[in-house]
Image (cartoon, rainbow, N blue to C red):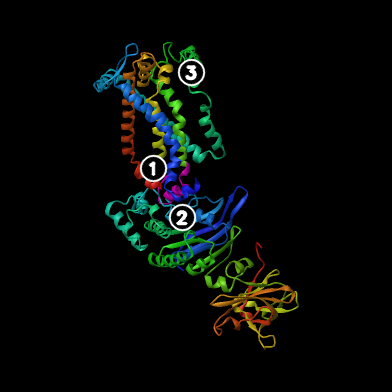
Amino acid sequence: MIAFLRRRPGLLPLLLLAPAIAWLVAFYVYPAIQMLQASLWSGTLETGFAFSWANAATYPEALGRYSDQFLRSILYAAVSTLVCLALAFPLAYTIAYRAGRWRTILLFIVIAPFFTSFLLRVLAWKTVLGDDGFLLGPLKAIGVLPEEFRILATPVAVIFGISYNFFPFMVLPIYVSLEKIDRRLVEAAKDLYAGPARAFQRITLPLALPGVFAGSLLVFIPAMGDFVNAELLGSVQTRLIGNVIQSRFLVNNDYPTAAALSFMLMAGILAAVFIYARVLGTDELESGIG
Amino acid sequence: MADVDVRLVNVTKMFGDQTAVDGITLDVSDGEFFTLLGPSGCGKTTTLRMIGGFEQPTSGLIELKGEDVTFLPAHERDVNTVFQSYALFPHLTIFENVAFGLRRSGIKGDEVTRRVGEALELVQLIGYEKRKPAQLSGGQAQRVALARALVNRPAVLLLDEPLGALDLKLRKQMGIELKRIQREVGITFIYVTHDQEEAMTMSDRIAVMNKGRYEQLAGPETLYERPTTRFVASFVGASNLLEGKIGSDGDSWTVTLPSGDVVRAPKSLGEIGTGGAIGVRPEKLTLLEPGQESKGNRLDGTVVDTSYLGVLTQYTVEGAGGLRLLVSEQNVDRTTRSDTWRPGERVALTWKPDHGFVVGDSKSA
C-alpha cells in the first residue's frame, strides 16, 4: 500500500479525502437528490405520490404562501447575528488581550452551555422568561412592570433565544482571529501617531474581520433554519420558515411543499453568504493574512 | 557637539521586583548614531521602549528636544521606531504601510504620494508600492520598516535590533546602507543591538550595557583600545586580562601575577583602583623565540593551540601558573602553515606597556 502510494504520490490527497467524500455522498448528496425528487411530487400520503416536472409549480406556490415566514426568518437571523456580534466582539477582545490568567476560564464559560442539551437550555429560558417567572414576577410584584408585560411569545424572546444559543459560534472565531494578531502591530500603529481608537480601527478591526465573517456565518446559517426557539419561546406570530418546514413534513405530511421550502431556504442562504462574502471582500483579507 | 536630542536622567524601570533599567543618565546629540550595546536582558530594549513611549519609567525623566516626554503616549511623540520583527501591517500594501504615519498626521493627497515615493527611493524599493508585506523578502521588509519610520521625518529614529532577522551577508550590507541613510537624512538614530561588530562599524558613540546600566559610554575606538571595565573588555572584542597583586611604580601600575612575573601599564591609561587588572588585546602581543631580546612586558609560555584563520593566525599560549593568553598574528610574512608556531613550542610573549589597557574596580562583576 505504502509502496504503491510512493510510486503515485498524486493519489494521496484523494485517499485522505475519500472518507469525507463518502460521508457527504451518503448523507448529503443522496438525501438532497431524494428531496429534490420529493419536491416534484404530487399527491398525498394516502393516495401515494407521483413524480412530474410539471409539479415545479409547488415552488412559487410555497414561496407565495409562506413569504411572511421566510422574511421573518431572514429578519430574526440577521438581528440575532448583529446582537451576537455586538456582544461577542468586546467579550472576545477582553478574553484575547485583557484576561491574563483568566483567559482559559473565560473561554470555558463561553462554551460551558454546550454541556447541556440544546432543548434543555431553551426550556430553561422559557421558565426564566415566563410571565410570572423569577425574572418578571418580582418586577411585576413591586410594580416596576405592568401586569400584562411579557417577553415570552414575543419576537424579542425568539431573537433572544437564537442569539443565546449561537453566541459561542460568534465568540470563538473572533477570539481566534484577535488572538492571532501580533500586538506589535498595534504598537507600530501607535508609534506612527495613531491613537488607541485609530489603531483599533485601522489595524485590529481589519485583521479580525475573517473571524467576524466566520462567526457571522456560523450564527446566521443555523439561525435561518431555527424552529426550536420559535416553537418554545415564540407564538403563532413568530413562526419561522423552519417551523413551517417542520410541520409540513411531520404534521401535515405535505412532503412536496416541505422539500420545496427546504430547497429555497438553502438557495436563499447560499445567496446571502455569497453577497456577504462579496461585501466583506474575503479574498482580499485572506491574501493580507497569508 | 550639536544640541541634545534625547536626554535620560536617572531613568529606572522595574518589572515587579526585577530592575530592568537601573538609573540610566545619558545625552544623545542631534544627528548622532548612538548605540545601546549589550547582551540579552541587559535593559537596552527596555531603555529604547521607554524613549519610544511603549513603557513608562518607574522613576526618572526623559526629554526629547528639551521637552519632558516621560509620560507622553507613543503616538504623541516625535519619535519613530523600526521594530525587531518589522511589524509591517499585513493587510495594507507597501504604499499604505509607508503612508500610515503621514495619514495619521493629516497629510493628504499628492503630498503623501510624493513623500512615500521619496522614502521608498531612499531605501531603493521603488516599484513595490502595490505589494503586500507577505510578498517581500526579509531584507525588503526591513527596508519598508525603515521607510515607514523615516517618511515621518521624526526627531529621533529608534531601531530595535533591525538586522537581527537577516542572514550575515545581508546584515553587513544593510549595516552599511543604514549608515548611508543616516548620513543622508541627518536624523538622530538610537540603535539597539547585541552584535558588537554591528555597533562598532555604524556608531558614533556606544553605551555598553550590562545588568540595567551602562558600563562605558564612548566611541568605538575608545571602547576597543581603552575599555574601562572587565565586562566591556570581554564583550567588545577579545581580551587578555592579567589579574594579580596591584602595585605602583613611578608612572606605571604594576600587576604581580601568581607566577611572580610583573606586568606594567602607564598610569595615564586610567585608574586601576584596588580590584582592577591590566589587559591587552590579542593582536597587540608579539611572539618571540624564548632567547630573543625584547623591551616592555614579557611573559614566557608554551603554545597549546594554533588556529589558522586566513588573514591571521590565532594562538593560545599557556604561561606559568596556568595563565592562558590569546594571541593573534597577521599572516604577512607567512605563506604556508608550516611557518606558524606549533603546539608544544616554547615562546616569549611581549607587548609595549602603553598598548595595554587598565580596567578599574568593576561595578557589577
Identify residue for label 1: A206
Sequence-earlier tag: 3 or 1: 3
The residue located at (34%, 11%) in the rendering is A46
Give the main secondary structure, helix, strand or loop, of the magenta stretch: helix
The label on residue A123 is 3
Label 1 SS:
helix
* Front label number (3 vs 1): 3
The amino acid on which the numbered mark 1 sits, given as a three-letter code, is Pro
Label 3 SS:
helix
Identify residue for label 2: B83
In this rendering, position of residue B289 left or right of residue A232: right
Residues at marks 3 and 2, CA–CA distance in whole angstroms = 54 Å
- Above-or-below relation of B308 to B210: below
Q: Which residues lie in the magenta part?
A: A179-204
Residue A252 among magenta residues:
no
The numbered mark 2 sits on a residue in which chain? B
Label 2 SS:
loop
Quadrant in which the C terminus of chain B appears: bottom right
